[in-house]
């Protein structure tokens, strides 16, 4: 079965600082991977998805970027964080045989 | 119309009752539908998926899909306090094609089951 790891679990960063969140997946190969953000009191917003190494699709214009350097690694980055970047960041993986998405434990980011 | 809409709630039911959670969707969403449960501070957990019209039962959970009415629901029988959580409805985006598979989520309904 698939397992998704995300770190760090929580992060407090000052405005203007850089960001790097990592997601790794076990138990599958060449998965579709997704980054979501859930802001307080709001729904899940799809930020990026990737169908393979080096292939990134952006859903929402913003100061965030994503990269997929390895098959089972997905990284979310920012050069300069904004207050509005605070939220719960979730990595998800697609189980293609059933078209079901599974989520990692998430990273809670607070930008001060 | 928003792509996936849910009543934000909160929905409060007594222990042992049936909780009914509803979701409507627009033409931008189709094919497959999913219900996720999200406890406070935790990530969403997939609890039900449904792909065709009708009912699908799994334990105390029943998902219902009506594509003509663009309506999907989740029934929780014999509700327990441990069912208290936010329930997210999601559907496949119609601009998903081939490997470009994406879901659209509703904002979720907060369910409270009172002992």
Image (cartoon, rainbow, N blue to C red):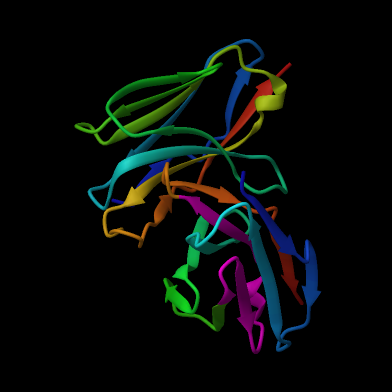
Left or right: where B97 falls relative to B17: left
Viewport quadrant of the N terminus of chain A: top right
In the rendered image, residue A10, in percent from the top left (x then y), is placed at 79, 64
Quarter assignment of residue B40: top right
Q: Nearer the viewer, residue B49 or B66?
A: B49
Magenta segment boundaries in residue numbering: A69-95
With respect to residue B2, does A19 lie above or below?
below
Regarding residue A111, the answer to whether it shows in the image is yes
Left or right: where B17 falls relative to A110: left
Q: Total number of numbered labels?
A: 0
In the rendered image, residue A7, in percent from the top left (x then y), is placed at 75, 65
Q: Residue at x 60, y 65 (%)?
A: A72
With respect to residue B28, does B19 lie above or below?
above
Quarter assignment of residue B70: top left
Q: Main secondary structure of the magenta part?
A: strand
In the rendered image, residue B80, in percent from the top left (x then y), is placed at 68, 18
With respect to residue B82, does A21 lie above or below?
below
In the rendered image, residue B74, in percent from the top left (x then y), is placed at 46, 26
Viewport quadrant of the C terminus of chain A: bottom right
Q: Residue at x 43, y 75 (%)?
A: A58
Residue B98 in magenta stretch: no
Regarding residue B25, the answer to whether it shows in the image is no
Q: Residue at x 72, y 68 (%)?
A: A109
Residue A76 in magenta stretch: yes
With respect to residue B9, does B17 lie above or below?
above
Quarter assignment of residue A92: bottom right
Q: Residue at x 61, y 75 (%)?
A: A76
């Amino acid at each position: 079965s698939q397992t998704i790891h995300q770190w760090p679990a929580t992060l407090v960063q000052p405005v203007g600082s850089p960001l790097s969140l990592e997601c790794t997946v076990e138990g599958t190969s060449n998965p579709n991977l997704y980054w979501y953000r859930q802001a307080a009191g709001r729904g899940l917003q799809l930020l990026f998805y990737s169908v393979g190494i080096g292939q990134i699709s952006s859903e929402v214009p913003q100061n965030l970027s994503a990269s997929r350097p390895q098959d089972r690694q997905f990284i979310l980055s920012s050069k300069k964080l904004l207050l509005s970047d605070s939220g719960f960041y979730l990595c998800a993986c697609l189980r293609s045989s059933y078209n079901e998405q599974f989520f990692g434990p998430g990273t809670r980011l607070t930008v001060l | 119309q928003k792509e996936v809409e849910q009543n934000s709630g909160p929905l409060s039911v007594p222990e042992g009752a049936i909780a009914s959670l509803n979701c409507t969707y627009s033409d931008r969403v189709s094919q497959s539908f999913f219900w996720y449960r999200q406890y406070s501070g935790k990530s969403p957990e997939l609890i039900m998926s449904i792909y065709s019209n009708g009912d699908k039962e799994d334990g105390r959970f029943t998902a219902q899909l009506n594509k003509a009415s663009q309506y999907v629901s989740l029934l929780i029988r014999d509700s327990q306090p441990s069912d208290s959580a936010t329930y997210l409805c999601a559907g496949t985006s119609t601009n998903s094609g081939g490997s470009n598979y994406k879901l659209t989520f509703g904002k979720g309904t907060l369910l409270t089951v009172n002992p």
